[in-house]
Amino acid sequence: MPLPPHIQVRHECLTFVVLGATGNLARVKLFPSLFNLFTAGHLPPRALIVAVGRTDLTHRAFGDIIGASIADAWKSPAAPRQDAAHPHASTGGDDPQHPSSQSHASATLLRTASDIGGSRPLTLNCAGSPGSPLPFSPKNKAPSLPLKSPTLPQGLIDEFLEHVKYVRVSAIAEDAAGAESSGVGAGGCGDDSSMSAVFDLVAAHEEEHGDASGCNRIFYLALPHEMYPAAADAIHRHGRSPEPGWTRLVMEKPFGIDLPSAVALNQSLAASWTERDLYRIDRYLGKEVIDNLLVMRFANRLLTPIWNRENVSNVQIIFKEPFGVQSGYFDSHGIIRDVLQNHLLQILAVLAMDRPVSLDPEDIRDAKLKVLRQVARVNPAQDVVAGQYTAGRGHGGYRDCPGVAEGSRAPTFAMVVLNIRNERWDGVPFILKAGKALNEKRSEIRIQLKPTPGDIFGDDGGAEYSSGPNEFVLRLQPHEEMYMKLTIKEPGLGVQPVPSEMELSGRWRAEQERKEAAGEAPRRAYERLLLDTINGHQAHFVRGDELEAAWSIVDPVNAAIDGGAVPLREYEYGSRGPEEADELRAGTGHIASVVPRDGLPLSSSDDLARLEPGVPTSAVWGRDC
């Protein structure tokens, strides 16, 4: 009887090749994630990481760069996390004098470290001073690390770097020349002779482990998408693993810039690679909350009957970042290509899909594809608001950024309202909002239910006494959590309804942190996705037809913005975005409401937007805002 894939792979030899190893993505996200998998014992014992780049570096110099990135990712915050006592604390909206804005500013700063691509200290359990014997070999158990250490033992970083080899390549395919200027970082890979040193190193590693039952290879393309065809072709011709081993390609977004380019890319890859060998990574699919959404939807009798147009009023999928654009790469893509086409539409697919036939990855991806194909064509004139930030609050505007073209029409903010034409969702607005240089760091899903039929509690006082609609909230950042907004009776005499909340993630969060500390669960989305790649599990990766369906949704929106049919609304750096976006959202029937918790607002600042500055939190109980 064959072993399960995640066990079989541990008996085999693995070479993990990173193309573009000197780029920012590899340094900040990829190598720290590989290090965390190494220290937790999740990498196969016979694993070698081959870093490929164009920069002229020695092994030691590259190791110093990667070691510094790993150590930086492990730095402890200067103060304890304040959100432990108030896990739902919000940044409190636009008003700096709002009671939650100042008291939780530092908590918000700390929470961002646990976001996608960030890090936070683990609870660890040994001394591990530099130079001391390490209690770990990749052939044995997971390492033991220092309890609440503000720094990482250098000896452990050194042990990881023993499994990393740097190879400099000099040539890049002619059709991809200059792609490294995108800011992603590039490793030359289109020229077979330049890659021969890489393939020779891989072959030597596999020969060293000739007793392994198989030899497997992963090529991570941390490159601009223009270089994917040349890289994939070179790997196919000279870099495939011999049978019975497997070879897999991992590719970063964006996958093209529109539907025609995505189709061309898929066709180019399909000439040499099967879909089972292609892993198109979307880090949001690696978030714990997204997996929880799948279980919550289909494992709870309470939710299954109401997850439809008869009960759901509207759905918001929100992505907000408080910083502006940091490279010229963004100007050729914009917020829709960079965030909405991939992250937000993938969330929508998991949120709105029908029950898959099984948990098999292909069944899940079939269900996602079906719902993406059912999204109605967007009317940009009615359903889209686009914006571009201007200077404000000590920061320059978008067009002041280096690499941004004069008169650029790349949107840094977009709100798009979608309708899914099927029996379950027809008529329910799905509001997708993404923006940079906004007032807070927040990504979340908000499913707002319709009012209770025959409401008897609003008859006397009208809307003033309404407790607001019920909502399910799933927050991805700055920290992961789930809760339900419900209506209860206000304490004391009478039966006046007031909003409250039902915590769904307290025990789950505690267990997740325990598993992270023990090395039983990946700490970050990238770690989970890398481990899925090693184990051959594709449920968290985007299939080619899903990708094309997503581009077909956003292409009309991009065309309308580029052509001027949708105006670019200006909004100040650090604000909530264009006012027209609030008007569009209100027009869908969305009702903003606030739920206090321990004297602090539980909702996002979107729901606090219309509160007057200085209004005490106690005054918003039951208030329709």
Image: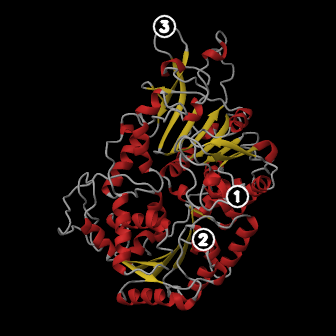
Q: Residue at x 61, y 27 (%)?
A: 610
Q: Name the side, left or right, on which 389 lies relative to 381.
A: left
* Residue that badge 3 annotates: 493
Residue type of the residue flagged with mark 2? Pro
Q: Position of residue 443 (x, y in %)?
A: 55, 45
Check disc 3: other Cα within 10 Å, few if <14, some if 14-19, many if 20+. Answer: few
Helix, strand or loop at mark 2: loop
Residue type of the residue flagged with mark 3? Leu
Helix, strand or loop at mark 3: loop
Q: Is residue 571 above or below residue 261?
A: above
Q: Nearer the viewer, residue 440 or 599?
A: 440
Q: Position of residue 345 (x, y in %)?
A: 65, 53
Q: Nearer the viewer, residue 141 or 267?
A: 267
* Residue that badge 2 annotates: 224
Q: Which mark is residue 406?
A: 1
Residue type of the residue flagged with mark 1? Glu
In the picture, which quadrant includes the N terminus? bottom left
Q: Residue at x 49, y 40 (%)?
A: 482
Helix, strand or loop at mark 1: loop
In the picture, which quadrant includes the C terminus? top right
Which-is-in-front pick, marks 1 and 3?
1
Q: Position of residue 539 (x, y in %)?
A: 56, 61
